[in-house]
């Protein structure tokens, strides 16, 4: 199975978990697994998203040992793998991928055009603004308004209360923003993605470039849902979520997922004679 196949399988199973789990809770009273990816309990073990945990600390102005233990595994994953939650587990990204697939089935376009490209540092401002508002208002905003969390919450509301919450409109808005720019929310507005990117700046798993094999054809940059250009070394940036799509699209094998010591860097190769960097070609 290809890397893309594995990613889609993991994403599908991750979404299936937050669909099946409330069904088991409600109809069979099986409560061994509870919650969704903001706060997930497996038996007596609790796992809390780093951003939700940080919000709780800022609101309560204190930190319990229980909360710290619940954050250890997600923090460790982010430190080692970066934004891998965004690329491999987040239901918003999976729903966006399904919408991209549907678009390719019904239109002749291979991918959607990015009509609005903004500075990537907006992601850091989104994280900072969210944390400041949390402290000012004394309420964990992302716990209530997180689009990835809202997917799980809407499923739970539908099963337990046979209704949907009005906040679920945020999920539709996020998906509609993909019509403007691929993964617009993920690129510029998601504070959880910002925190995971910040934690993963020194991550060990990266998309690395073998300069001697790269022909600078531009396929990797056009395939990246975040608009990164791995041929310029951007696969090693904090923003990359290690989805591996560029690795799958590379025809020469110049890109690969590899473990690094965090200090190794690659230089962008010079364009081959007669072939300008970023030349258009098949995806």
Image (tube, helix red, strand yellow):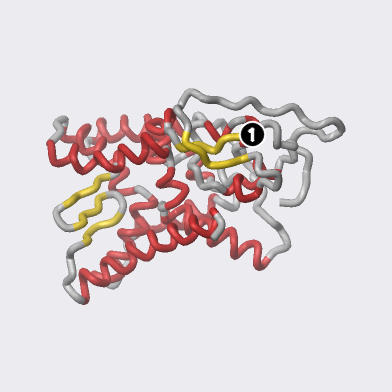
Q: Secondary structure at mark 1?
A: loop
The residue at 31%/30% (across/down) is 132
Give the percent coordinates (x, y) of residue 257: 53, 41
Which residue is at a point 50% across and 55% down the rendered structure image?
175
Q: Is residue 268 above or below residue 46?
A: above
Q: Position of residue 67 (x, y in %)?
A: 17, 40
Apparent side of residue 167 relative to residue 239 in the rendered image (left or right)? left
Residue drawn at x 75%, y 37% is: 215
Query: Residue 181: in sight, yes or no?
Result: no
Q: Which residue is mark 1?
A: 210
Q: Position of residue 229 (x, y in %)?
A: 63, 36
Q: Nearer the viewer, residue 61 or 48?
A: 48
Specify few, some or many for label 1: CA neighbours under 10 Å numbering under 14, 14-19, or 20 or more: some
Q: Residue drawn 42% across and 37% down?
A: 82
Q: Is residue 153 left or right of residue 215?
A: left
- Image x and y of residue 261, in percent: 45, 28
Left/right of residue 138 with respect to residue 172 in the rendered view? left
Residue farthest to the top, as pictured: 263
Q: Quadrant of the N terminus?
A: bottom right
């Amino acid at each position: 199975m290809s890397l893309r196949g594995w990613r889609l399988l993991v994403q599908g199973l991750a979404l299936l978990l937050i669909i099946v789990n409330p069904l088991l809770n409600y109809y069979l009273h099986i409560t061994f697994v509870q919650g969704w990816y903001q706060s997930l309990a497996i038996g007596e073990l609790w796992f809390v998203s780093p951003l939700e945990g940080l919000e709780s600390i800022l609101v309560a102005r204190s930190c319990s040992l229980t909360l710290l233990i619940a954050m250890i595994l997600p923090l460790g994953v982010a430190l080692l793998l970066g934004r891998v939650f965004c690329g491999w587990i987040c239901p918003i990204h999976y729903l966006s991928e399904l919408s991209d697939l549907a678009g390719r089935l019904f239109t002749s376009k291979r991918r959607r055009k990015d009509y609005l490209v903004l500075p990537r540092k907006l992601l850091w401002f989104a994280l900072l603004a969210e944390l400041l508002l949390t402290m000012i208002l004394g309420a964990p905003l992302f716990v209530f308004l997180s689009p990835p969390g809202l997917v799980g919450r809407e499923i739970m509301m539908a099963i337990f209360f046979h209704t949907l919450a009005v906040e679920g409109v945020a999920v539709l808005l996020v998906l509609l923003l993909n019509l403007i720019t691929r993964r617009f929310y993920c690129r510029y507005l998601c504070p959880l993605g910002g925190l995971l990117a910040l934690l993963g700046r020194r991550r060990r798993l990266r998309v690395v470039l073998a300069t001697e094999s790269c022909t600078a054809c531009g396929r990797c940059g056009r395939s990246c849902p975040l608009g990164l250009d791995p041929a310029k070394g951007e696969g090693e940036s904090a923003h990359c979520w290690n989805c591996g799509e560029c690795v799958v699209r590379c025809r020469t094998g110049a890109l690969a997922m590899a473990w690094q010591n965090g200090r190794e860097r690659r230089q962008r190769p010079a364009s081959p004679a007669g072939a300008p960097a970023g030349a258009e070609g098949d995806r």
